[in-house]
Amino acid sequence: MKIATREVDHVTIVDISGRIVLGDETGQLRDTVCGLISQKKTKIILNLAEVDYIDSSGVGELVGSFTTVRKSGGELKLLNLTQKVQDVLQVTKLYTVFDIKEDEFTAVKSFDYFFAK
């Protein structure tokens, strides 16, 4: 799994590619999110466009990241879900928990409360 972060309009986008599975991958995701929070970056989008597989631990880590960001006063949103990830979130009913966006522009602007209304 590869993770890269970038900033767009004060929003941090975390580009993830590969598999989010138990082990180093979930730890890597956790470390990335915790690192962003420690830098006071609490507007986070996880871009999952290139995630080809996610297991139950990966789903658990997404929920854990969501909770961690929420507790620090921030928001975490998901972007560009692949069909496999979408299916897993629908089966687990987590589709209703996450704010999921289809395109990056809308996702970034959704943090701007004037635009979101």
Image: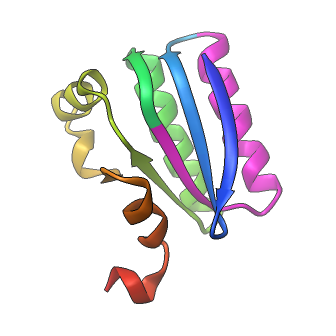
> The N terminus appears in which quarter of the rendering?
top right
Left or right: 37 as drawn, with respect to 60: right
Q: Residue at x 24, y 43 (%)?
A: 95
Q: Residue at x 68, y 57 (%)?
A: 7
Query: Does the stretch in magenta take in 32?
Result: yes
Residue placed most toward the observer, 24 or 50: 50
User: x and y percent of residue 16 in the render?
Assistant: 55, 30
Q: Residue at x 59, y 65 (%)?
A: 74
User: x and y percent of residue 112 in the render?
Assistant: 48, 79
Rendered image quadrant of residue 5: top right
Q: Name above or below for residue 114 compared with residue 61.
A: below
Q: Name above or below for residue 115 compared with residue 38.
A: below
Query: Does the stretch in magenta take in 65?
Result: no
> The C terminus appears in which quarter of the rendering?
bottom left
User: x and y percent of residue 56 in the render?
Assistant: 38, 18
The residue at the far right in this view is 39
Q: Residue at x 59, y 21 (%)?
A: 26
User: x and y percent of residue 58 in the render?
Assistant: 47, 22
Residue placed most toward the observer, 61 or 5: 5
Q: Name above or below for residue 78 compared with residue 48.
A: below
Assign the magenta stretch its main secondary structure: helix
Q: Which residues are magenta?
A: 23-47
Q: Name above or below for residue 86 compared with residue 53.
A: below
